[in-house]
Image (cartoon, rainbow, N blue to C red):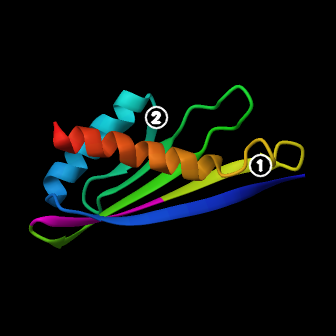
């Protein structure tokens, strides 16, 4: 039996929406994750991560919104298919991928 495991994380970043939006696309490229949908107007991205040797790929849904001119709110959600057999091995894989994305984003913004 398979199901989707969903996880999400919301952060506020002290950078403008334009800078964050550009960095998001670079991060996804650097990680080798495929952009499946990109909405420039709504500042939303749907990306697919790489599968691991013992795990499925995840879908990341990234939503960027300005709070003010110098602050951006990012909501990153993951959806990872999990089978009952792989549930223990895949535990929190979506959360790890979200944190990996934020780690790479921090490096990109600091550059």
Instruction: Place residue 17 in its image quadrant.
Output: bottom left
Q: Please give the residue where the numbered disc 2 appears in the rendered image.
A: 34
Residue reaching furthest bottom?
Answer: 67
Q: Please give the residue where the numbered disc 1 appears in the rendered image.
A: 82
Residue 42 or residue 90, whichever sits in front = 90
Q: Which residues are magenta?
A: 70-76
**Does residue 37 appear in the picture of this structure?**
no
Cα gap from disc 2 to disc 1, whole angstroms: 20 Å
SS class of the residue under badge 1?
strand
Estimate the x, y position of residue 31 in percent, counting from the top left: 42, 31
Image position of 92 with respect to 107: above or below: below
Image position of 30 with respect to 102: above or below: above
Estimate the x, y position of residue 80 in percent, counting from the top left: 66, 50
Say the numbered circle drawn on residue 99: none
Query: Which residue is drawn at the image coordinates 36% and 31% (left, top)?
Result: 29
Q: Earlier in the sequence, mark 2 or mark 1?
A: 2
Image position of 93 with respect to 31: above or below: below
Q: Are marks 2 and 1 in contact (CB under 8 Å)?
A: no
Estimate the x, y position of residue 5 in percent, counting from the top left: 69, 58
Query: Which residue is drawn at the image coordinates 23% and 65% (left, top)?
Result: 72
Estimate the x, y position of residue 24 in percent, counting from the top left: 30, 45
Whether residue 34 sits left or right of residue 68 in the image: it is right
Judge whether residue 92 is colored magenta: no
Residue 18 or residue 84, whichever sits in front = 84
Whether residue 108 sits left or right of residue 27 in the image: it is left
Residue 102 or residue 30, whichever sits in front = 102
Label 1: few (<14), some or many (≥20) within 10 Å? many
């Amino acid at each position: 039996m398979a199901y989707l495991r969903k996880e999400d994380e919301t952060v506020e970043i002290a950078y403008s929406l334009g800078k964050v939006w550009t960095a998001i696309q670079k991060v996804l490229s650097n990680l080798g994750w495929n952009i499946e949908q990109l909405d420039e107007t709504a500042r939303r991205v749907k990306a697919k991560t790489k599968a691991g040797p013992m795990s499925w790929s995840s879908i990341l849904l990234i939503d960027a919104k300005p709070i003010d001119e110098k602050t951006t709110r990012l909501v990153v959600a993951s959806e990872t298919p999990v089978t009952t057999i792989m549930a223990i091995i895949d535990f929190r894989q979506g959360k790890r991928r979200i944190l990996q994305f934020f780690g790479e984003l921090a490096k990109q913004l600091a550059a």
